Image (cartoon, coloured by chain):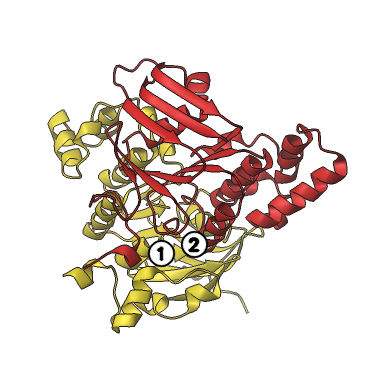
């Protein structure tokens, strides 16, 4: 079973005095978790640590214990930096052929994934010509092509239009990835599919549990259907 | 008969007349006089391209564009707005003294960002700073692409208040339906390079136009319809 465990984790970026994460304790197993909190609370940094890229890509200093067990795919906020190939089809082909799939199987997987993400018409367009929302879908498709056990998404709804958001929620709930970690402000889309919400404030976890039991916090954007007036 | 040269005089602050651009914009007609105008539409509809035409970053293949000289802008990648190493230096360019910068940022609850490196801001913080930078130099109009991506609820309210408080025409492109509903006065619905509908924000949201382009009904609208009220935000019910 895939899991991520963080024990008393402190992290700071290189050339920075200030700790961004200040003693985070968090373990995530087979569940769908949303991480929320106001901007600058450390959400993105926490996801970088959980996916293992913090030290490898950014460097800096990490204290505490980070255990990552399972294949991780991570879609960062600056996802368009990570699309390497000129077209979505080439990007997906590159990822899939690295998994020793035959040419036919690659074709079949590309068709499946592009249908899931609604990017069938975009497959042969140039990535630089795609809008941000379209690129975000391509980035998520590439992550899914990695066939991960743990999928980590940083603000996946940021650029996606409302119709795409509804489709993405449906996709995420049927994906079959055992562990899903999402950082997001808008809980409304995810309220029905998540098991747990984690609230960060100033680099520490201030709440972890069900959405219903979460504290009244102006930074938590409640789905209206759950508001009680 | 000789043709007379007729200069186009527009009363609108920003106007696009039959604008075509590659296969992205297919005959866009749009006028912005005052207030906040929102462009709504699915990914790839052409919203960002329309904004780029407005600030004259793109030259349309056909059609004409009327826009003021000084247009402030903030783009989907907020880091594009930055040219200086720190937030303080960015604002010092337009505001005379450190105290003034402090007061300006403080009035939007961002005083703690004063000495931060711009490239080290989180995406949400960078977006807020980028929007303030677009406003601070006194432009005649403002163009903002996706003003709320990466912002928490409280910050979205702050941006909405900020945009409503400035007295110049503002054009936003967004698919944050709740934000548009509470912020904008007028809406253009963009789909596949065409403007398929335009109107007063409440008229558009309380019709079924958005459902026709595949968007789900915003929760506020659903609740408003249940209560028989044309709500802009939930706060109206609370109060």
Q: Classify residue A6 by image quadrant.
A: top left
Would you say B36 lies left or right of B109 here?
right
For chain B, give the colour. Answer: yellow
A202, B43: nearer the viewer: A202
Residue B177, disc: 1
Marks 2/1 same chain: no
Name which residue lies at 29% across and 31% down: B87
Would you say A18 lies left or right of B42 here?
left
Name which residue lies at 16% across and 40% down: B106
Q: Position of residue B122 (x, y in %)?
A: 37, 35
* Chain ID, red in image: A
Q: Position of residue B92 (x, y in %)?
A: 23, 31
Crowdedness near tag 2: few (<14), some (14–19) or many (≥20) residues, C-alpha within 10 Å: many
Give the residue at the far bottom of this rendering. Answer: B228
Residue A179 visible to an observer of this rendering: yes
CA gap, disc 2 and disc 1: 8 Å
B207, B5: nearer the viewer: B207
Residue B34 visible to an observer of this rendering: no
């Amino acid at each position: 079973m895939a899991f991520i465990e963080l024990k008393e984790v402190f992290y700071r970026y290189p050339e920075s005095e200030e700790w961004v994460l200040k003693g985070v304790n968090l373990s995530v197993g087979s569940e769908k978790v949303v991480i929320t909190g106001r901007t600058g609370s450390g959400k993105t940094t926490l996801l970088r640590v959980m996916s293992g890229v913090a030290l490898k890509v950014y460097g800096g200093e990490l204290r505490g214990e980070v255990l990552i067990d399972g294949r991780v795919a991570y879609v960062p906020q600056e996802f368009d930096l990570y699309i390497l190939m000129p077209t979505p089809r080439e990007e997906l082909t590159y990822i899939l052929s690295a998994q020793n799939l035959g040419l036919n199987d690659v074709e079949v997987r590309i068709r499946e994934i592009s249908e899931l993400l609604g990017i069938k018409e975009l497959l042969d367009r140039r990535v630089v010509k795609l809008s941000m929302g379209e690129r975000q879908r391509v980035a998520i498709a590439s992550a899914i092509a990695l066939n991960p056990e743990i999928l980590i998404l940083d603000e996946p709804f940021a650029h996606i239009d409302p119709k795409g958001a509804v489709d993405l929620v449906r996709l995420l709930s049927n994906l079959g990835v055992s562990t899903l970690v999402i950082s997001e402000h808008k809980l409304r889309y995810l309220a029905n599919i998540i098991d747990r919400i984690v609230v960060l404030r100033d680099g520490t976890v201030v709440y972890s549990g069900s959405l219903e039991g979460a504290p009244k916090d102006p930074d938590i954007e409640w789905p209206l259907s759950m508001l009680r007036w | 008969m000789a043709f007379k040269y007729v200069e186009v005089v527009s009363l609108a602050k920003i106007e696009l007349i039959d604008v075509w651009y590659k296969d992205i914009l297919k005959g866009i007609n749009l006028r912005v006089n005052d207030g906040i105008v929102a462009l709504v539409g699915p990914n790839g509809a052409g919203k960002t391209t329309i904004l780029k035409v407005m600030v004259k970053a793109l030259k349309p293949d056909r059609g004409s564009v009327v826009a003021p000289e000084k247009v402030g802008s903030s783009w989907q990648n907020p880091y594009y707005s930055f040219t200086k190493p720190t937030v303080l230096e960015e604002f010092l360019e337009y505001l005379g003294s450190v105290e003034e910068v402090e007061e300006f940022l403080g009035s939007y609850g961002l005083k703690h960002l004063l000495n931060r490196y711009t490239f080290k801001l989180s995406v949400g913080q960078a977006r807020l700073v980028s929007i303030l930078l677009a406003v601070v130099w006194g432009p005649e109009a403002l163009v903002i692409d996706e003003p709320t991506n990466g912002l928490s609820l409280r910050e979205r309210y702050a941006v909405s208040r900020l945009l409503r408080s400035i007295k110049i025409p503002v054009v936003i492109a967004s698919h944050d339906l709740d934000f548009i509903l509470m912020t904008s006065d007028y809406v253009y619905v963009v789909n596949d390079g065409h403007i398929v509908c335009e109107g007063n924000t409440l008229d558009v949201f309380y019709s079924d136009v958005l459902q026709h382009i595949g968007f789900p009904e915003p929760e506020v609208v659903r609740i408003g319809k249940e209560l028989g009220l044309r709500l802009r935000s939930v706060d109206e019910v609370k109060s």
